[in-house]
Image (spheres, rainbow, N blue to C red):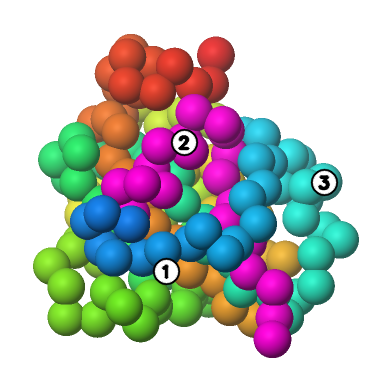
Amino acid sequence: MAKKYVVMAEEGEHGLLEQVRERFGLDLSDAELIYTGVGGINIIRSLQGLDREAEIYNIGYAGSANFEVGSWAEVTEVRLNHPNVTYKEPELRPTPIPSLKGREIKRAICYTNCDFVLASEYKDCVFDMELAFIAALGFKTLHSLKYVSDNLSLHSYHDLTRGVE
């Protein structure tokens, strides 16, 4: 059986695991928890040695232009955020979480950035700083749940999370 990991950027996100258990009935207590640090370089350095057969649960904060703060999104596709240019990228689609089938939860694209997004014309999606890099590493099973921490406001994000400086 493949090893299971919960991947989070920062220790401050740990409280989200209890919400995931209570709200969605998803108990990940048998998974090893990895805090990677924020951003692509930290993801690569933290996860490059893991077996690609591992089951990865990426759970963390994300911004959204229009989703309500405090809502959850299951990520259906992940892309890099490069709104000023278009270029071909591989399609990266996390694996749906079977226990969430039929549950009321937003399902959305996640745009991964190398910096905090303060404005975007993209709607009905979430923005993070790690998921595309995790997906690009090629894990056979990758799930992702994002908690909307802000509406593209660094101030609101800080108030809620005390995260990224």
Residue 39 within the segment the image draws in magenta: no
| Tag of residue 77 | 1
Q: Which residues are magenta?
A: 1-20
Quadrant position of residue 124: bottom left
Could you tell whether 3 is left or right of 93 in the image? right
Residue visible at 57% across and 64% down in the picture: 30
Residue visible at 40% across and 23% down in the picture: 161
Could you tell whether 84 is left or right of 35 in the image? left
Label 2 SS: helix
Q: Residue 117 placed where, x, y %?
A: 41, 31
Where's the N terminus, which quadrant? Answer: bottom right
Amino acid, disc 2: Glu
Q: Is residue 70 above or below residue 110?
A: above
Amino acid, disc 3: Arg
What residue is shown with label 2?
A: 13
Residue visible at 19% across and 35% down in the picture: 69
Q: Residue 4 placed where, x, y %?
A: 63, 69
Instruction: Work out how far the residue at label 2 is from the one at label 1, CA to CA, in angstroms.
Output: 22 Å
Where's the C terminus, which quadrant? Answer: top right
Label 3 SS: helix
Contact between labelled residues 3 and 2, with CB atoms less than 8 Å apart = no
Residue visible at 16% across and 73% down in the picture: 103
Quadrant position of residue 134: bottom right
What residue is shown with label 3?
A: 45
Instruction: Count all numbered tags in the image, as a single digit.
Output: 3
Q: Nearer the viewer, mark 1 or mark 3?
A: 3
Q: Nearer the viewer, mark 2 or mark 1?
A: 2
The disc, 2 or 3, on the residue closer to the chain's N-terminal end is 2
Instruction: Work out how far the residue at label 1 is from the one at label 3, CA to CA, in angstroms.
Output: 23 Å
